[in-house]
Amino acid sequence: MIGMPTAPGRGVLETTLRDHRESGHKLLVPYVTGGMDDEWLVTVEAVAGAGADAIEVGIPFSDPMIDGPVIQEASLRALGRGTTPTGILADLGRLHVGIPVVVMTYYNLIYRAGHQRIAGLMAESGVSGAIIPDLPLEELEPWARAADDAGIATVLLVAPSTPPERIAAICRRSRGFVYGVGRMGVTGEQSSLAGSAREVAERVRAATELPVCIGIGVSTPEQATTVCEVADGVVVGSALVRRLLEGAGPVGAAEFVSSLRVALDGG
Amino acid sequence: MSGPHSGPHSLSESESELIMGDPGPSGRFGEFGGRFVPESLVPACMELEASFRRAWIDPAFRRELDHLLHSYGGRPTPVTECLRLSEELGVRVLLKREDLAHTGSHKINNVVGQALLARRMGKKRLIAETGAGQHGVATATAAALFGMECVVYMGAVDMERQALNVFRMELLGAEVRSVESGSRTLKDAVNEALRDWVASVDTTHYCLGSVMGPHPYPWMVRELQRVVGDESRAQCREILDGKDPDVVVACAGGGSNAAGTFAGFADGTSSVLVGVEAAGGAAMHNGIPGVLHGMRSALMQDESGQILEAESISAGLDYPGIGPEHAHLAAIGRARYETAGDTEVVEAFQRLSKTEGIIPALESAHAVAWVIRVAGTEVLPTGSTVLITLSGRGDKDVAQVRDILRRGETTPR
């Protein structure tokens, strides 16, 4: 998006996703756990080149309580390889994928590093957004201020259980896009899409002009297409990470992301 | 029952001036506490807080709770003066006998309260985490009493060392789910219970077992355990001719029996409050502020913020954190936190058994061990008076201690 004017208060993440949306394009945000194997950076590049609009990179935490077995396993492997938050950010800083990178992690890693310090490191590494699922609206401000100052978009989540007035408040404070949680539960693949995924998408859609992406329980091209009848896009994590854990490698990961892309493009 | 616990509890302005009062809607104890949970759980935590606030000032709720704690739970539990141990140590040792409560520990106080609350909220399923199994057994008991479904998450390592408690829970009709993730102990059982709750929150109440987790749990569980401290204070005054003990001691993993005990003494007495952690799980000693399981508190963690695994002889104290109010009480100097190592704990376990005919839980033996170590020093001078909350009985630990003594394997930490 080099050379494109950035609207005041809009960072690279929001500008990019809005532009892609306005060009009639559904948004695809694949998730990869940082440091999960020797090839993870190659995977990120391959996935980015396979039609992703942004990529979410997990910074592994010892106690990933909103994650199901697949991301837990990937996190465990990453930590077993000596992966650290600053190591992931340094690696990302050497990467040129041409699409916005959003990191996903748990709050203790942010808190331990220091808000300003880690926000600065993210910005230096070219990261444009952060998702911190255990940092709800009421606890957000010390981090969100540091993130805003560093130009890091803090993406907030709306759950199926979130009441309407809260949805409005979350959407006002979210940056980049709004992450709609597709179902009540931890991350993981589902054989069928929860009815709540579409409902959340509708509720968030009605509350904000920001791009709306649905994640958690979106596993297949069909499910992604269904959700995107209402939502602007999808985040796909466990379905991709499971393939990586099973040895799909960068090529297999790119093939899967391509299949999502083709489906979303109506193919 | 008499004392401050039995009366209607009004949330007056004076409440916020108390050292152990109402933390308010933010759930903050100084800089600690809060509600660091995924958005999916925020509405449930808010609903729980609102329900607890209404129930706690409802005389009908309080009457039913007090009645159940009396007629079913065996309250009030006595305070026993340890004549032989006092003679040996040169200090006057009083024990608050939570080992005599139903299910063998103070955990029953909390679960009866939470089960009553769950029923009020229309929830028909209870989930719980457990370390040593005491909280799991208590939750399974309350679920049986109220006819609720019960699932208890327990680390695979803990299931091995507390096999008898696993069977007790099953006997009581609960399903015990083995937790194979992470260190496979209490911390991981909490993660797994939270994961269950995210998916089941409509029908399920998470019956958290200690003064930890997201608001309102640290406050709510402390209030439900306050009965330990309130009873103790009145009982000590009878025994000590209207005086309070010089020192009040309780073991602390998450810290629920310590919080309940301290709540009776923090305001209005000058008793020194001491929490005793396991040397291998000493969040107050080896931890620094961090965020885990919904709360900001002292946590054992590495330089990146990854949580470290606690390691103790006692499954109930095998937790890398501690309740946020304890971190606050330490920060303001109202309570101090000490540690006891495995070897002195096993010695204290045997000594209390032999001198008083009371077999303490290994958790509670940490508090006894600290008293034995410091008796006659300036912390606990000869002639002073100490109250120890004996949080539970040691039947569950007898086989483990036998094995340890046969192998002769405890080493000082």
Image (cartoon, coloured by chain):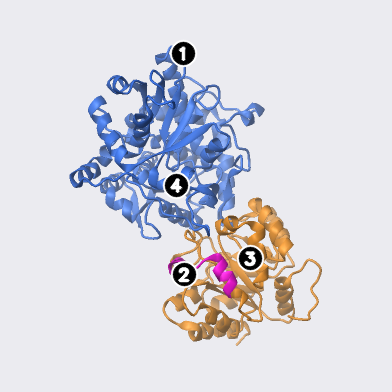
Residue carrying label 1: B242
Based on the picture, tell me whether residue B6 belongs to the magenta stretch.
no
**Do the residues marked 4 and 1 share a common chain?**
yes
Chain under numbered label 2: A
Q: Which mark is residue B124?
A: 4
For the residues bearing labels 2 and 4, Cβ distance under 8 angstroms = no
**Do the residues marked 2 and 4 share a common chain?**
no
The correct choice, above or below, for B320 with respect to A105 in the image is above
Q: Few, some or many C-alpha atoms within 10 Å of disc 2 (few <14, some 14-19, many ≥20)?
A: many
Mark-to-mark CA distance, 2 and 4: 39 Å
Residue carrying label 2: A78
Query: Could you tell me which secondary element the residue under label 3 belongs to?
Result: strand
Q: Few, some or many C-alpha atoms within 10 Å of disc 4 (few <14, some 14-19, many ≥20)?
A: some
Query: Could you tell me which secondary element the residue under label 1 belongs to?
Result: loop
Q: Few, some or many C-alpha atoms within 10 Å of disc 3 (few <14, some 14-19, many ≥20)?
A: many
Give the magenta range: A72-91
Residue carrying label 3: A130
Instruction: Choose mark 2 or mark 4, whichever is in front.
Output: 2
Q: Quadrant of the N terminus of chain B?
A: top left
Chain whose colour in the figure is blue: B
The disc, 3 or 2, on the residue closer to the chain's N-terminal end is 2
